[in-house]
Image (tube, rainbow, N blue to C red):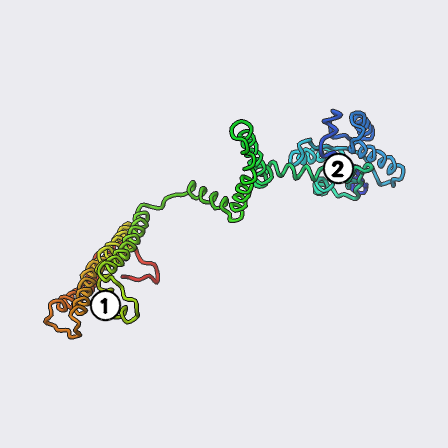
Amino acid sequence: MAEKETQQQTQKRILILCVDRDGDLEVKANVKTPLLGRTANLDGAVSLALKDPEEPDANAMFEAVRLYDRLQNEKQPEEIFEVATISGTDLGGVSADRKLVAELNNLLGSFSANEVILVSDGYSDEAVLPLVESRVPVSSVRRIVIKHSESIEETAALFSKYIKLLVDNPRYARMALGLPGILVFIFGILWAIDNFVYPGAIYYYGIAIVIVVGGFLLLKGFGVDRATKDLYRWVRDYEPPPLPIQVSNYTVIAGILCVAVSVYLGLASVSINVAPFPSDLGGWLGKTPKIASFFIKGVQDLLVVGLSIVLFGRIIRLYFERDSRLLRNVALVVTVIWFRWVLESTANVIIYYYNKSSSVIGINNPIFSNFLFTIIVGILIGIASVLLIYIINRSSKDFFKKKQEGEDEL
């Protein structure tokens, strides 16, 4: 047994392999593959040539048999030659390659070759050669090209490849088929209208071409189709965030809208109470206090409401997240609400001294006293808020989550 294995290792077992990747041998001649041996391959080649004398694969099989006969006459004592044919399918692609590999493995089980001499019609070398080389070394490649057939076959294969790409690939089909299809469809409609409804409608076809082609180029050029597809995927796959985050996001939007409307109301208040506006810089400087006071009066209410809505939404989110910054936002809400009276008293002070045309500010003036009162109360509210936050934070440590390293305590 050991002597037999040693003898096989010293022998050069060479397989002359003919490959019919498109499966013409089975489809046209009804010959089952794989074919192993000179007689089987010669009979298969004759059957295929009788069915289709112009078939390149038949000539490749004849060449494989001829090469086998020549090498048999020239062989060395340690060389053993065999000829075989395998075929794929007329579907091509992956299915053809899988069938080729299965038949090659079957052949190698019957004749364990050390090397392969590949015989093909030339066009399929690029696809077949890696499949064979991955299983047994290829020592030579013999390409059989019938007169005038190589360039014609490669050109036809190239055209068929691109035509199939234009038809099957949606990306290219929209441009190669879809756009001309729309233009032909519009032409048919206008032609029917021209013949049966409104003579002369066909002359509008030029306008239709410009509109359709121009619209298509604009959509493709600015990526409107891709943006629409991305938007559709985002809407389809959108998963709403948790309810506290949704509430926070909606309150931010509502707050921003309130602030924007408050700015509009401030400008409207200025327009109503300050008009007519001066035309020179000196007049604008003289009316600046009046403009500022009426702008503050118009903006103050909705500005405070908008900021409070944003803070309330954040408070709700932080409460569900058990974040201690909740207390800070509560203090900010109190401060913002009181800030409304600060704005009101500031506007009153500005407009009062603007109308009086006096720079004398007295503590006995009720308007000025009210302004000082709101400022002092605001400071006290801020201090009280800080102390209250500190006390509540100390007394409710179990409610709030532990802070990460480096995060503020208050």
Mark 1 packing: few (<14 Cα in 10 Å), some, or many (20+)? some
Residue nearest the observer in this picture, 409 or 360: 360
Indicate which disc residue 153 carries: 2
Tell me which residue sits at (27%, 61%) in the image: 410
Q: Are marks 2 and 1 in contact (CB under 8 Å)?
A: no
Residue type (three-letter) at the residue carrying disc 2: Glu
Helix, strand or loop status at disc 1: helix
Of the numbered discs 2 and 1, the one sitting upstream in the chain is 2
383 to the left or right of 406: left
Q: From the image, state whether disc 2 or disc 1 is nearer to you.
A: 1
Residue located farthest toward the bottom when viewing the structure as drawn: 360
Residue 58 location in percent, x, y? Answer: 80, 31
x then y, percent, for residue 398: 25, 54
SS at circle 2: helix
The residue lying furthest to the front in this view is: 199
In the displayed structure, 174 sits above or below 375; it is above
Based on the displayed image, in which of its 4 quarters is residue 239 positioned? top left
Residue with the mark numbered 1: 289
Q: Would residue 238 appear left or right of 270 to someone viewing this image?
A: right
Count residues near mark 2 (Cα–Cα under 10 Å), then give few for <14, some for 14-19, many for 20+.
some
